[in-house]
Amino acid sequence: MKFVKNNFTMTDFIRFFIPLYFIFFFIVSFLGISYKVAKQIGKNPNVLPKDGSAYALVGLYFKLILLSLLVYVMLLLFFPEDIFPAFKINYMENDIFKYTGFVLLIFAFIWVCIAQLQMKESWRIGIDSEVKTELIMRGLFRFSRNPIFLGMTISLIGFFFVVPTVIVFAFLLIGSILMQIQIRLEEEYLLKQHGEIYQAYKKRVKRMLNLY
C-alpha cells in the first residue's frame, strides 16, 4: 500500500517508527526518569537484586527480553525484507490493526510517563527493601494498581498489531508473564509495608484496570 505519493510505503514507515519509538520509550521512561529520581533520592532507583535468588532471575529475564526486543526492532530497520515476512500472522495484516497499534503505542507511552511522574520519589525499578516508599493512590493509580506495567503491556499489544509476527507475540507473552510475576512480588512487599491501607486499596482498585 502506498503511504505517500513518493513511494514511501507503510512498511517503510513502520521500519523507522518502531525502532525510534522503543528507543525513545527506553530513554525517557527508563534512563530519563531514573536520572530524575536518582537526583531526588540520592541513589540509583534501579534496585533489582543481582544475587542468585528467584527474584534476581526475574530481573535478569526482564533485561534479556528488553535487549532481545531492541535487537529485533533494529533488525526490522536494517533488514526489513527478511524480518517483516518472518513468521508473519497473515490474517492480522491489514490497516485496521496497524492504525489501532499506532494509537495504542502512543497512548501507552503517554500513560507510562504520566504514571511515572505521579509516583515521584516512590518510583523504582524493582523492590526497594531499604526504604519505605509512599503508597501512591492518586492520579492513574485510582484506576490501576499497576499503571506502568499496564502501559508497558499495552505498548507490546500495539507492537503486535503493527508487526503481527509470532516473534512479536512471543515478546508480548513472555513480557506479560514476567510483569505479572513482578506485580505479585511487589504486592507482597507493599502488603507488608502498608498493611491495612494497602489491603483496602487492593479491594478498591483492580490489579490492572478498573472498568467502571
Image (cartoon, helix red, strand yellow):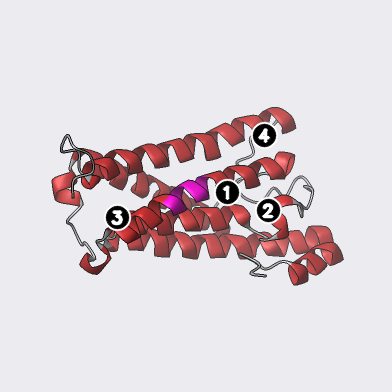
Assign a secondary structure to mark 4: helix
**Is 32 in front, or is 98?**
98
**Three-letter code for the amino acid on which mark 3 is drawn:** Val
Predominant secondary structure in magenta? helix
Q: Left or right: 135 with respect to 166? A: right
Q: Which range is magenta?
A: 103-109
**Three-letter code for the amino acid on which mark 1 is drawn:** Trp
Residue at the image position 53 percent from the left and 34 percent from the top: 31
Q: Disc 1 or disc 4, which is closer to the eye?
A: 1
Counting from the top left corner in percent of width and height, residue 166 is at 27, 63
Determine crowd level at label 3: few under 14, some 14-19, many 20+ residues with C-alpha closer than 10 A.
Answer: many
CB atoms at circles 1 and 2 under 8 Å apart?
yes
Assign a secondary structure to mark 1: helix
- Judging by the rendered image, the residue that carries numbered circle 3 is 163
- Residue 140 numbered tag: 2
| Mark with earlier residue (4, 2) | 4
Residue at the image position 42 percent from the left and 48 percent from the top: 66
Cα–Cα gap, marks 3 and 2: 28 Å
**Three-letter code for the amino acid on which mark 2 is drawn:** Leu
- Judging by the rendered image, the residue that carries numbered circle 4 is 37
Counting from the top left corner in percent of width and height, residue 143 is at 68, 61
Q: Give the position of the C terminus as an image quadrant.
A: bottom right
Assign a secondary structure to mark 2: helix
Residue at the image position 75 percent from the left and 46 percent from the top: 130
Assign a secondary structure to mark 3: loop
| Mark with earlier residue (4, 3) | 4
- Residue 111 numbered tag: 1
Residue at the image position 76 percent from the left and 72 percent from the top: 203
